[in-house]
């Protein structure tokens, strides 16, 4: 007689609820890193430099208010529904650009975020395992 045992991971249907806070922290850190590197978080391209004459402070960081006053939230139960509330009025102009100012997108998620998302989600995808035995 032949006996077979099959063990498969048991999916956690609440994986998003369980990983939401870690994932939100990764979103914030990802955008913070892009900010520090003066690059677009979506494309990973460097921001366009200022047109002289300009100050010597880092791009988009004369006072430090724009990023410091930005808050990140994951308001609902939909996976990857992240929102950033910009705490200064001029933040949106930099994000989108204007006719007289190039776009310097400082918020967003790009393909480089996938590794960070995977790291945050992976521990929550499965809860235990299910074993089947056939005789």
Image: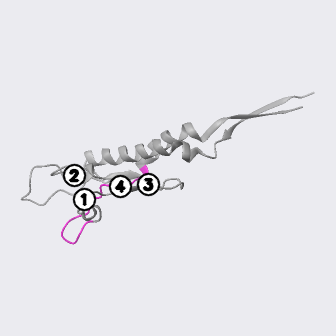
Pointer 2 and pointer 3: residues touching (CB < 8 Å)?
no
Mark 2 or 4, closer to the camera: 2
Can the viewer see residue 87? yes
Task: Give the CA separation, mark 2 to mark 4.
Answer: 24 Å
Q: What SS does tag 1 mark?
A: loop
Compared across the picture, whether 48 is left or right of 14 comes to: left
Residue that appears at 28% across and 57% down: 87
Label 1 CA crowd tier, 10 Å (few <14, some 14–19, many 20+): few
Between label 3 and label 1, give the one nearer the viewer: 1
Q: Residue 134: within the magenta?
A: no
User: Which residue is tagged 2?
Assistant: 65
Q: How far apart, in angstroms, are the residues tagged by discs 2 and 3?
A: 21 Å
- Sooner in the amino-acid sequence: mark 3 or mark 4: 4
Crowd around label 2: few <14 · some 14–19 · many ≥20 (10 Å): some
Q: How far apart are marks 1 and 4 (CA)?
A: 24 Å
Residue range (magenta) = 97-111
Residue drawn at 49 percent across, 53 percent down: 80
- To which quarter of the image does residue 26 belong? top left
Label 3 or label 4, whichever lies nearer to me, is 3
Cα separation, mark 3 vs mark 1, equals 19 Å
Task: Tell which circle, 2 or 3, labels the residue nearer the N-terminal end.
Answer: 2
**According to the image, label 3 marks what residue?**
82
Marks 3 and 1, the one that precedes in the sequence = 3
Q: What element carries label 2?
A: helix
Residue 102 within the segment the image draws in magenta:
yes
Across the whole image, how many numbered discs are drawn on residues?
4
């Amino acid at each position: 007689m032949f006996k077979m045992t099959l063990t498969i991971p048991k999916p956690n249907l609440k994986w998003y609820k369980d990983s939401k806070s870690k994932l939100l922290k990764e979103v914030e850190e990802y955008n913070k890193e892009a900010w520090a590197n003066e690059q677009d978080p979506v494309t990973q391209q460097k921001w366009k430099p200022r047109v002289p004459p300009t100050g010597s402070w880092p791009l988009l960081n004369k006072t430090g208010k724009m990023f410091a006053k930005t808050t990140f939230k994951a308001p609902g139960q939909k996976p990857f529904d992240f929102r950033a509330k910009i705490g200064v009025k001029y933040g949106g102009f930099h994000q989108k650009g204007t006719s007289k100012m190039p776009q310097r997108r400082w918020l967003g998620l790009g393909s480089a975020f996938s590794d960070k998302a995977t790291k945050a989600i992976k521990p929550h995808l499965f809860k235990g395992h299910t074993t089947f035995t056939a005789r």
